[in-house]
Amino acid sequence: MTRMLQLAQASLLPHRARPGMAPLDTSTTVLRVHPGDLDLYLHVNNGSYLQMMDVARSNLLADLGGLARLKAHGWYPVVAASTMTYKRSLQLFDRVTIATRVVGWDQRVVYLEQVFTRRDGEFCARGWVAGRFLGRDGIRVAPQEVVALLADAELESPELPADLAAWARSVDVAHRDVDRA
């Protein structure tokens, strides 16, 4: 199954919500490396990591019971920025677990961390994603509204780790006093 089909399945036919799952809890997605994920060097292509992360983020929303809620409001997620750090290559047929968690949010974006590990727990890669939510009209939805919808309550964002906050400023997605975009 291609990653696009997996993403469509995760987004359009999501699994049931995990009871007791909260927006700051970690969601895990287990995938297997397919031949289409490989590059000419026979390890996972960097673009395939991003596609796997898309599937894992949809699974996080499904775990929260959030996909139907977002759809009812006409809201949908988009990636504003992402970055990857690679430590170990993933090879054909490796079973990989992607742990996805919301690290925090500001007035512009939600920050997620997605960690790839092999079956034996060996760390392979980590991605940070700055995500936005848009309405049907293309207008940005405040992250606090999305988190409140998913949590059924107002939540305060945890403080962002210094390295994540620095990255967000460097790629110009972090909240600033005068919002230009």
Image (cartoon, grey):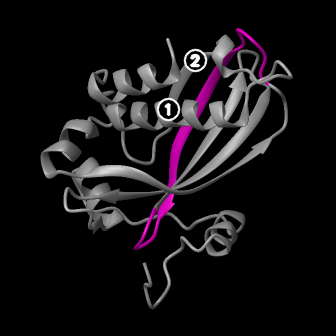
Which label is found at residue 122? none
Disc 2 crowd, CA 10 A, few/some/many (<14, 14-19, 20+): some
Element class at badge 2: strand
Q: Position of residue 169 (x, y in %)?
A: 63, 75
Element class at badge 1: helix
Which label is found at residue 31? 2
Residue 151 seen in the current view: no
Residue 99 seen in the current view: yes
Q: Residue at x 20, y 62 (%)?
A: 137
Q: Residue furthest bottom?
A: 178
Q: Residue at x 52, y 44 (%)?
A: 101
Q: Is residue 101 magenta?
A: yes
Q: Position of residue 97 (x, y in %)?
A: 62, 23
Query: Residue 180, relative to residue 143: is it above or below?
Result: below
Q: Residue at x 43, y 84 (%)?
A: 179
Which residue in the structure is indicated by mark 1?
56
Q: Which residues are magenta?
A: 90-109
Badge 1 or badge 2: first in the primary sequence: 2
Disc 1 crowd, CA 10 A, few/some/many (<14, 14-19, 20+): many
The amino acid marked with disc number 1 is Ala
Q: Is residue 11 magenta?
A: no
Query: Residue 157, relative to residue 97: is it above or below?
Result: below
Q: Position of residue 67 (x, y in %)?
A: 26, 38
Depth check: give the residue in front, 3 or 143.
Answer: 3
Query: Residue 60, relative to residue 78: is it above or below?
Result: above
Q: Are marks 1 and 2 in contact (CB under 8 Å)?
A: yes
Left or right side of 104 for 124? right
Q: Residue at x 26, y 62 (%)?
A: 138
Q: Position of residue 144 (x, y in %)?
A: 32, 65
Depth check: give the residue in front, 37 or 103.
Answer: 37
The amino acid marked with disc number 2 is Leu
